[in-house]
Amino acid sequence: MSGPGEVVVVGGGMVGAAITCALAQRGFQVRLLERQAPECGWPRGDFEIRVSAISRASKNLFANVGAWPEMVRRRVTPYERMVVWEAGGGELRFDAGELGEPELGHIIENGVVQCALWSVLRERPEVEVIAGAELLSLEPDERRPRLTVKLRGEARRLEADLVIGADGARSQLRELAGIGTSGWSYEQHALVCTVRAEEGNRSTAWQRFMPSGPLALLPLERRHFSIVWSTTPAEAARLAELENGAFDEALTRASEGRLGRLTLEGERGLFPLRLQHASRYIAPGLALVGDAAHVIHPLAGQGVNLGLMDAAELVEVLTRARERRRPLGHLQTLRRYERARKGENLAMQAAMDLLKRLFGNDVPPLKAARNLALELADRVDPLKRLLVRNAMGTWGELPPLVRAPS
Ligand SMILES: Cc1cc2nc3c(=O)[nH]c(=O)nc-3n(C[C@H](O)[C@H](O)[C@H](O)COP(=O)(O)OP(=O)(O)OC[C@H]3O[C@@H](n4cnc5c(N)ncnc54)[C@H](O)[C@@H]3O)c2cc1C
């Protein structure tokens, strides 16, 4: 292979935008296809209801591609402590200071992540953004995969050395490539909103396990929390329709009043939860990353972090392939990426699934075992450190893009 390497990225969400920035930084020519370019005006009045708990590894990636300062300028909230508890049961506390870390992670609005990445990629001469195009077809090919898109009423053919599918859980590209998925619905919906807490946020993330599903309270600037309340679809619908005062009461009760009274600010949103995994991450001339490849339960806030890890690994594999003059879209090249990521993503998916099931019932012996596990994890320092390093994404051998910037 000669030349800089041409890549088409389909989907400019958090993962697609991140991989576009990273590839451009390494001199690849990237065309980014996005159905709808994000609205990036700032400042915004309210907090967005979609936020992510961003791990240290993901923060490193943002810093390495030059997007972190813009995220900080907009709004990021570090959290130093985390409390996981079960009503009438065990409790597990993490404290960054005790573990010798400056913070456990950051809570960032999804739009802030996406817009900061877009502000970087829009400045890169290697990137062409094609917004508003409709994907019509894919011709997979190890050397020159081709896409046909409809843009302003006209069909246009795009060729590249590789097409990357970062087009989310309902990936059309995955479908066009004939890659199936396995998985199931959790029969749970996540109710998502922002609240103000009487007692401020104390730089602490909270998670309470209940038989109907976990309730997460993620700290946002000043006195606010982003709420992710996973429960049965019927209960979620009921909560979504409660009059504001009644909702505040229900939420304050569900959090056992640990943060004083919680008051809703703005709208509530509902997201159906499912587990989904693509049977393959690759096809000739194609690689899937992020939610296009895997969707997990949000209970440990790992979905986008895994997607960004995919991005970091794929960029590394492509950079090495280019150095060795190997075709980017060759299955032999792409298998390195799939091998590096599939096992880890499946393991995280399985761990979240197990946690969800373990805490999702009230059987007395299981409850006793859970309490014991929480208490034990709380007291055994090395175990706690391992859990934290895992959640921070700083465990094991890491691709350069997610290592701390030097
Ligand atoms: C309630 C909830 C809470 C969560 N909390 C966390 C958390 O705390 N931490 C965490 O790590 N993860 C969390 N997640 C998961 C996280 O939101 C997802 O993993 C992440 O958004 C996936 O990013 P992505 O870029 O892969 O896909 P998406 O965000 O789905 O982006 C896909 C992009 O592709 C574009 N697109 C789609 N189809 C096409 C097409 N045909 N042509 C062009 N463009 C297209 C879309 O417009 C979109 O911009 C949570 C998820 C939920 C539901």
Image (cartoon, helix red, strand yellow):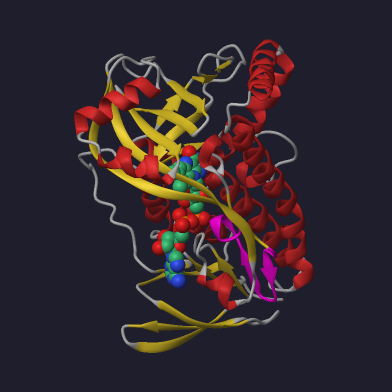
- Judge left or right: residue 298 versus residue 313: left
Q: Which residues are magenta?
A: 279-293
The residue at 57%/66% (across/down) is 28
Q: Which quarter of the picture shows residue 268?
A: top left
Of residue 353 and residue 40, the one placed in the foreground of this image is 353
Of residue 381 and residue 360, the one placed in the foreground of this image is 360
Can you give x and y, in whole percent of width and height, for residue 177 in the image? 62, 76
Residue 221 seen in this snapshot: no
Residue 78 seen in this snapshot: yes
Q: Is residue 286 magenta?
A: yes
In the depicted structure, whether residue 228 falls above or below residue 208: below
Q: Which quarter of the picture shows residue 252?
A: top left
Of residue 6 and residue 115, the one placed in the foreground of this image is 115
- Judge left or right: residue 129 versus residue 47: right
Q: Which quarter of the picture shows residue 393?
A: top right
The residue at 49%/32% (across/down) is 214
The residue at 65%/45% (across/down) is 349
The residue at 34%/44% (across/down) is 237
Q: Which residue reaches farthest front?
A: 363
Q: Locate the N terminus by quadrant.
A: bottom right
Can you give x and y, in whole percent of width and height, for residue 68 in the image? 44, 40
Can you give x and y, in whole percent of width and height, for residue 40 in the image? 29, 52
In the depicted structure, whether residue 303 falls above or below residue 211: below
Can you give x and y, in whole percent of width and height, for residue 73 in the image? 33, 37
In the depicted structure, whether residue 142 falls above or below residue 253: below
Q: Is residue 332 magenta?
A: no
Of residue 334 and residue 168, the one placed in the foreground of this image is 168
Q: Locate the C terminus by quadrant.
A: top right
